[in-house]
Image: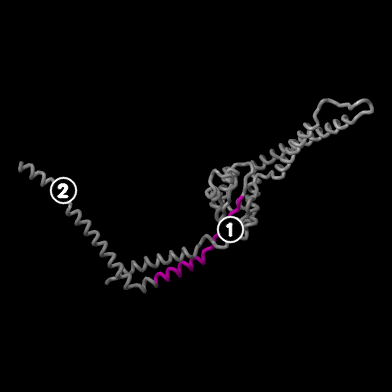
Amino acid sequence: MNDKQNFNQSDEINFEPFFQFIINIFKKIGGFFRLYISRLLKGFKTVTMYCLLGVSISVGVSFLITPRYEMEMIVKSNYLSRAYYYNEISALGKLIEGQSYQHLSEALRISTEQAQNLHDIKISDRLINLLGRDTSIANAKTFAIHTEVYDVSLSADLETGILKYLEGNPFALEYKTHRINTLNELISKLENDITEIDTLINVLAEEMIPSSGSGVIFGEPINPTTLLDQSDQLYAKLLHHRAELAFIDNIHLVKSFIPYNNPIFPKKSTFALYGILAGFLLSSILLLAKKP
């Protein structure tokens, strides 16, 4: 029995060294922070001087960097999918990324100097994220084209170039030509049908004129009202197809580029904050490395 009790006592784990180790670590951390705070308080002027120096340098550097602005236009695709235009705009973004400004200028029909002022172009999901993916504007293939430029004065030329680029793609042109031919054939057929019905209505009207003999002579038992209804329906279809033909372009501008006067980069407030942090860190290292 005594042997069993001795075995249980010897088998117990002693956590005291572990807790003492943790306590010593916290004591060292506390001592470090006390030393750090005391030196910061004593060297407050030094910290302030380095922070001001960091702000001056960082803000000065921001003035040397070419500012970058963002612009956004909203377009609507009538027939082709949003994914198709996403690939087309992504191709432009790759040209910018690869600094292929000559090809970019040819694609957008702008000068090479204007192409060099483009930093980025992409299709933004802002509208879908704002309105939801199940809304009519998302289903209607309306999307925003977001650009970042170094010169906001090229907004008009860039907008025209993007619209012509999206409309002038070989596949888009082929699709547009096919629709134009189809609509012209439908319009021609409807015009002929309406003319024939109008002619038949006139013939019926003449046959319904009373003759000099007894009573009224009717032609075939065709109801003129039915013909008028058919003529009205065909005319409504004709107007619809003419409207389609008037808006046959694959892409339509909903909202033009609106250049923002404030650059998105560099932001002087952000650079100033970086300068303060850099000055504070540098001064802290110097104060801690200084011998007491």
Q: Quadrant of the C terminus?
A: bottom left
The disc at residue 117 is: 1
Residue at label 2?
13
- Residue drawn where x is 65% and y is 44% of the image: 250
Q: Main secondary structure of the magenta part?
A: helix
| Residue type at numbered disc 2 | Ile
Q: Residue furthest front?
A: 215
| Residue type at numbered disc 1 | Asn
Q: Is residue 24 magenta?
A: no
State whether residue 280 is above or below residue 258. Answer: below
- Residue drawn where x is 6% and y is 42% of the image: 3
Q: Which residues are magenta?
A: 49-74
In depth, the one of 74 and 152 nearer the eye is 74
In depth, the one of 22 and 271 nearer the eye is 22
Q: Position of residue 281 (x, y in %)?
A: 37, 65
Q: Position of residue 185 (x, y in %)?
A: 74, 36
For the residues marked 2 and 1, what is the alpha-carbon distance in whole angstroms? 71 Å
- Residue drawn where x is 31% and y is 73% of the image: 42
Q: Position of residue 59 (x, y in %)?
A: 48, 67
Q: Quadrant of the N terminus?
A: top left
The answer to whether residue 57 is left or right of residue 15 is right
Q: Is residue 55 magenta?
A: yes
Crowdedness near tag 2: few (<14), some (14–19) or many (≥20) residues, C-alpha within 10 Å:
few
- Residue drawn where x is 53% and y is 52% of the image: 97
Q: Residue furthest right?
A: 212
The answer to whether residue 161 is left or right of residue 237 is left
Q: Earlier in the sequence, mark 2 or mark 1?
A: 2
Q: Identify the image quadrant of residue 274.
A: bottom left
The disc at residue 230 is: none
